[in-house]
Image (tube, rainbow, N blue to C red):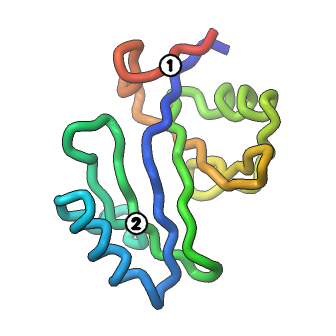
């Protein structure tokens, strides 16, 4: 199916005990504030200056700290099917996105983007 996608976001998943210290570190590391998202208060984030990407720090409920990436797409079903054909597996749905696992077992998310956001200038076009 014809659609667009791009690797768009790096998400740092942090348990509550480490969250504030991690948030403070990453704000200093990237040199800009990461603000709490209204719709998803467990996230703090920002579009990174000088890039097309974003950084999010997510407060998770349990488990070790880790990082994952988000792939944004204008056709969730087509992108999930494309990634499954490459060896990824669905793990579960969360809000409007699909959590997946790559062939090495690493988690990542496929997130629907707003219509018209992804173009040939800022993403890959898949036929």
Q: Is residue 23 left or right of residue 108?
A: left
- Residue at the spot 34% in from the left edge and 83% down from the top edge: 20
> Which of the marked residues, 2 or 1, is nearer the chain's N terminus?
2
Residue 29 to residue 117: above or below: below
- The quadrant of the picture occupied by the C terminus is top right
Q: Mark number for residue 33?
A: none
Q: Mark number for residue 57?
A: 2
Secondary structure under badge 2? strand
Q: Residue 2's spot in the image, x, y percent?
A: 61, 12
- Identify the residue position indicated by label 1 in the image: 124
Find the distance from the CA under tag 2 to the CA under tag 1. Answer: 26 Å
Q: Residue 13's spot in the image, x, y percent?
A: 51, 68
Are the residues flagged by discs 2 and 1 in contact, CB closer than 8 Å? no
For residue 60, which quarter of the picture? bottom right
Secondary structure under badge 1? strand
- Residue at the spot 71% in from the left edge and 49% down from the top edge: 100
């Amino acid at each position: 199916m014809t659609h667009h996608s791009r690797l768009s976001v790096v998400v740092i998943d942090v348990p509550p005990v480490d969250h504030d210290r991690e948030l403070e570190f990453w704000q200093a590391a990237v040199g800009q504030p990461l603000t709490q998202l209204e719709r998803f208060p467990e996230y703090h984030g920002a579009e990174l200056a000088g890039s097309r990407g974003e950084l999010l720090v997510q407060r998770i409920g349990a488990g070790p700290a880790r990082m994952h990436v988000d792939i944004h797409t204008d056709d969730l079903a087509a992108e999930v099917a494309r990634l499954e054909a490459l060896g990824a597996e669905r793990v579960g749905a969360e809000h409007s996105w699909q959590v997946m696992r790559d062939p090495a077992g690493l988690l990542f998310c496929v997130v629907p983007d707003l219509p018209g956001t992804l173009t040939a200038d800022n993403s890959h076009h898949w036929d």
